Image (cartoon, grey):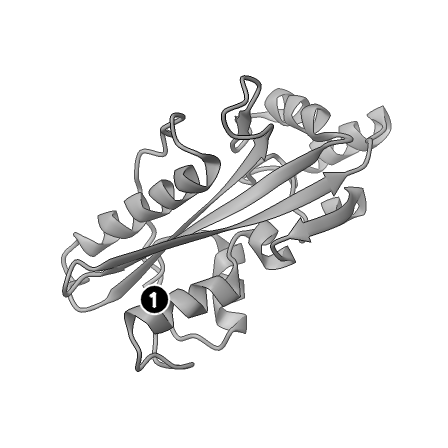
Amino acid sequence: MLASASPRRHRLLASAGLDFRIVPADVDETMDLALDAGRVAEELALRKARAVAARDGCGDAIILGSDTVVVLGEDRAADRRFLEKAGGPDEARAMLGALSGSRHRVITGVALVDARTGGQLLGHEVTHVRMRELTDRELEAYVASGEWEGKAGAYAIQETADRFITGLEGGGFDNVVGLPVALTLGLLRRMDPGFGVGSGA
Protein backbone atom coordinates (compact mmCIF):
# COMPACT_ATOMS: atom_id res chain seq x y z
CA MET A 1 0.00 0.00 0.00
CA LEU A 2 1.15 3.53 -0.76
CA ALA A 3 0.46 6.04 2.00
CA SER A 4 0.43 9.02 -0.35
CA ALA A 5 -2.04 10.95 -2.47
CA SER A 6 0.78 12.27 -4.69
CA PRO A 7 0.11 11.53 -8.37
CA ARG A 8 3.85 11.85 -8.98
CA ARG A 9 4.61 8.98 -6.61
CA HIS A 10 1.77 6.97 -8.12
CA ARG A 11 3.31 7.34 -11.58
CA LEU A 12 6.83 6.45 -10.44
CA LEU A 13 5.68 3.26 -8.70
CA ALA A 14 3.46 2.26 -11.61
CA SER A 15 6.32 2.82 -14.07
CA ALA A 16 8.40 0.38 -11.99
CA GLY A 17 5.77 -2.28 -12.65
CA LEU A 18 4.40 -2.44 -9.12
CA ASP A 19 0.85 -3.36 -8.24
CA PHE A 20 -0.26 -1.30 -5.25
CA ARG A 21 -3.25 0.23 -3.50
CA ILE A 22 -3.39 3.92 -2.59
CA VAL A 23 -4.39 4.78 0.98
CA PRO A 24 -3.49 8.44 1.60
CA ALA A 25 -2.21 9.31 5.05
CA ASP A 26 -3.50 12.37 6.88
CA VAL A 27 -0.87 13.20 9.50
CA ASP A 28 0.70 16.13 11.29
CA GLU A 29 3.71 17.13 9.18
CA THR A 30 5.38 19.27 11.84
CA MET A 31 9.14 18.79 11.56
CA ASP A 32 11.57 18.05 14.37
CA LEU A 33 14.18 20.65 13.49
CA ALA A 34 16.69 19.17 15.94
CA LEU A 35 17.26 16.32 13.45
CA ASP A 36 19.48 16.25 10.39
CA ALA A 37 17.47 16.88 7.21
CA GLY A 38 17.66 13.24 6.10
CA ARG A 39 16.19 12.11 9.40
CA VAL A 40 13.46 14.73 9.12
CA ALA A 41 12.40 13.26 5.78
CA GLU A 42 12.53 9.70 7.15
CA GLU A 43 10.49 10.58 10.23
CA LEU A 44 7.78 12.26 8.17
CA ALA A 45 7.65 9.23 5.85
CA LEU A 46 7.45 6.87 8.83
CA ARG A 47 4.64 8.91 10.38
CA LYS A 48 2.61 8.43 7.20
CA ALA A 49 3.32 4.70 6.93
CA ARG A 50 2.47 4.05 10.58
CA ALA A 51 -0.79 5.98 10.32
CA VAL A 52 -1.98 3.81 7.44
CA ALA A 53 -0.69 0.58 9.02
CA ALA A 54 -2.88 1.26 12.07
CA ARG A 55 -6.08 1.44 10.05
CA ASP A 56 -8.63 -1.34 9.74
CA GLY A 57 -8.14 -3.44 6.64
CA CYS A 58 -4.39 -2.87 6.42
CA GLY A 59 -3.28 -5.60 8.79
CA ASP A 60 -1.63 -7.88 6.23
CA ALA A 61 0.06 -5.28 4.05
CA ILE A 62 3.43 -3.63 3.67
CA ILE A 63 2.88 0.12 3.83
CA LEU A 64 5.11 2.55 1.93
CA GLY A 65 5.35 6.11 3.22
CA SER A 66 7.39 8.84 1.58
CA ASP A 67 8.07 12.52 2.13
CA THR A 68 10.19 15.04 0.23
CA VAL A 69 11.84 18.08 1.78
CA VAL A 70 13.70 20.93 0.11
CA VAL A 71 16.52 22.37 2.20
CA LEU A 72 18.60 25.52 1.87
CA GLY A 73 21.76 25.48 3.98
CA GLU A 74 23.63 22.66 5.64
CA ASP A 75 22.67 20.70 8.73
CA ARG A 76 23.62 22.43 11.99
CA ALA A 77 24.05 25.75 10.17
CA ALA A 78 22.16 28.63 11.73
CA ASP A 79 20.68 29.59 8.37
CA ARG A 80 19.36 26.12 7.43
CA ARG A 81 15.85 26.48 6.07
CA PHE A 82 13.20 23.95 5.03
CA LEU A 83 11.02 25.05 2.12
CA GLU A 84 7.68 23.29 2.41
CA LYS A 85 4.61 23.59 0.19
CA ALA A 86 3.74 27.22 -0.43
CA GLY A 87 0.48 28.40 1.07
CA GLY A 88 -0.18 30.94 -1.69
CA PRO A 89 1.39 32.94 -4.52
CA ASP A 90 3.28 35.32 -2.23
CA GLU A 91 4.91 32.45 -0.36
CA ALA A 92 5.71 30.67 -3.63
CA ARG A 93 7.32 33.84 -4.95
CA ALA A 94 9.44 34.16 -1.82
CA MET A 95 10.54 30.51 -1.95
CA LEU A 96 11.51 30.71 -5.61
CA GLY A 97 13.39 33.92 -4.93
CA ALA A 98 15.34 32.17 -2.19
CA LEU A 99 16.12 29.19 -4.46
CA SER A 100 17.13 31.33 -7.44
CA GLY A 101 20.85 30.89 -8.07
CA SER A 102 21.18 28.32 -5.29
CA ARG A 103 22.63 24.87 -4.77
CA HIS A 104 20.08 23.22 -2.49
CA ARG A 105 19.17 19.75 -1.31
CA VAL A 106 16.09 17.75 -2.20
CA ILE A 107 15.74 14.84 0.19
CA THR A 108 13.11 12.12 -0.01
CA GLY A 109 12.57 9.86 2.96
CA VAL A 110 11.17 6.37 2.42
CA ALA A 111 9.62 4.25 5.16
CA LEU A 112 8.23 0.73 5.04
CA VAL A 113 6.04 -0.68 7.79
CA ASP A 114 4.98 -4.33 7.83
CA ALA A 115 1.51 -4.14 9.36
CA ARG A 116 1.65 -7.86 10.18
CA THR A 117 4.80 -7.75 12.30
CA GLY A 118 5.36 -4.08 13.08
CA GLY A 119 8.75 -4.27 11.39
CA GLN A 120 10.01 -1.14 9.71
CA LEU A 121 12.79 0.00 7.39
CA LEU A 122 13.90 3.57 6.69
CA GLY A 123 16.07 5.24 4.10
CA HIS A 124 16.52 8.51 2.25
CA GLU A 125 18.16 9.86 -0.86
CA VAL A 126 19.77 13.27 -1.28
CA THR A 127 20.02 15.17 -4.55
CA HIS A 128 21.92 18.45 -4.71
CA VAL A 129 20.10 20.67 -7.20
CA ARG A 130 21.64 23.68 -8.91
CA MET A 131 19.13 26.31 -9.98
CA ARG A 132 20.19 29.23 -12.14
CA GLU A 133 19.24 32.81 -11.40
CA LEU A 134 15.64 33.50 -12.34
CA THR A 135 14.64 36.75 -13.96
CA ASP A 136 11.76 38.69 -12.42
CA ARG A 137 9.72 37.92 -15.51
CA GLU A 138 10.38 34.18 -15.26
CA LEU A 139 9.55 34.13 -11.57
CA GLU A 140 6.27 36.00 -12.04
CA ALA A 141 5.24 33.81 -14.98
CA TYR A 142 5.95 30.65 -13.02
CA VAL A 143 3.97 31.84 -10.01
CA ALA A 144 1.09 32.83 -12.30
CA SER A 145 1.10 29.33 -13.86
CA GLY A 146 0.11 27.72 -10.57
CA GLU A 147 2.51 24.85 -11.21
CA TRP A 148 4.07 25.42 -7.78
CA GLU A 149 0.92 24.34 -5.93
CA GLY A 150 1.37 21.27 -3.75
CA LYS A 151 5.12 21.08 -4.46
CA ALA A 152 7.84 21.23 -1.81
CA GLY A 153 10.01 24.24 -2.55
CA ALA A 154 7.30 25.61 -4.88
CA TYR A 155 8.65 24.06 -8.07
CA ALA A 156 8.16 20.89 -10.13
CA ILE A 157 11.26 19.65 -11.94
CA GLN A 158 9.18 17.12 -13.88
CA GLU A 159 7.11 19.92 -15.41
CA THR A 160 8.29 23.26 -16.82
CA ALA A 161 10.65 24.16 -13.93
CA ASP A 162 13.25 21.81 -15.44
CA ARG A 163 14.39 24.80 -17.53
CA PHE A 164 15.60 26.49 -14.34
CA ILE A 165 17.81 23.54 -13.31
CA THR A 166 21.43 23.45 -14.42
CA GLY A 167 22.57 20.29 -12.67
CA LEU A 168 21.81 17.41 -10.31
CA GLU A 169 24.43 15.83 -8.06
CA GLY A 170 24.18 12.68 -5.98
CA GLY A 171 20.64 11.34 -6.08
CA GLY A 172 18.51 10.98 -9.16
CA PHE A 173 15.81 12.87 -11.01
CA ASP A 174 13.12 10.60 -9.57
CA ASN A 175 14.19 11.59 -6.06
CA VAL A 176 13.55 15.25 -6.90
CA VAL A 177 10.17 14.31 -8.36
CA GLY A 178 9.23 12.63 -5.09
CA LEU A 179 10.31 8.99 -4.84
CA PRO A 180 13.76 7.36 -5.29
CA VAL A 181 12.63 4.20 -7.06
CA ALA A 182 15.81 2.13 -6.75
CA LEU A 183 16.05 2.85 -3.02
CA THR A 184 12.38 1.97 -2.57
CA LEU A 185 12.70 -1.33 -4.43
CA GLY A 186 15.80 -2.21 -2.41
CA LEU A 187 13.97 -1.62 0.87
CA LEU A 188 11.02 -3.71 -0.33
CA ARG A 189 13.35 -6.61 -1.14
CA ARG A 190 15.00 -6.34 2.28
CA MET A 191 11.67 -6.42 4.06
CA ASP A 192 10.25 -9.21 1.90
CA PRO A 193 12.93 -11.38 0.24
CA GLY A 194 10.21 -12.89 -1.96
CA PHE A 195 9.24 -9.48 -3.31
CA GLY A 196 9.19 -9.12 -7.06
CA VAL A 197 7.63 -6.95 -9.71
CA GLY A 198 3.88 -7.50 -9.65
CA SER A 199 3.89 -8.82 -6.09
CA GLY A 200 2.33 -5.62 -4.74
CA ALA A 201 3.29 -3.09 -2.13
> Quadrant of the image for the C terminus?
bottom left
Q: Give the vertical position of 137 relative to 114 (above or below).
A: above
Name the residue rendered at 74%, 41% in the picture: 130
Q: Quadrant of residue 83?
A: top right
Q: Residue furthest top?
A: 78
Looking at the rendered structure, the kind of residue marked 1 is: Arg
Q: Nearer the viewer, residue 61 or 10?
A: 61
Relative to 190, say whether 38 is above or below.
Answer: above
Q: Residue at x 64, y 26 (%)?
A: 95
Are there few (<14), some (14-19), or many (20+) residues within 10 Å of tag 1? some
Picture coordinates of residue 81, whole percent (x, y):
55, 25
Camera-nearest residue between 89 and 69: 69
Residue at the spot of label 1: 21
Q: Secondary structure at mark 1?
A: loop
Residue in view at x 48 percent, y 77 percent = 17
Q: Is residue 201 visible?
A: no
Nearest the camera: 196 or 121? Answer: 121
Q: Quadrant of the N terminus?
A: bottom left
Query: Could you say where residue 176 lies in the image, as x and y percent from the top left?
Result: 60, 50
Residue 197 position within the rendered picture, expressed as x and y whole percent measured from the top left: 42, 81
Residue 68, percent from left and from top:
49, 44
Q: Can I make out residue 190 in this image?
A: yes
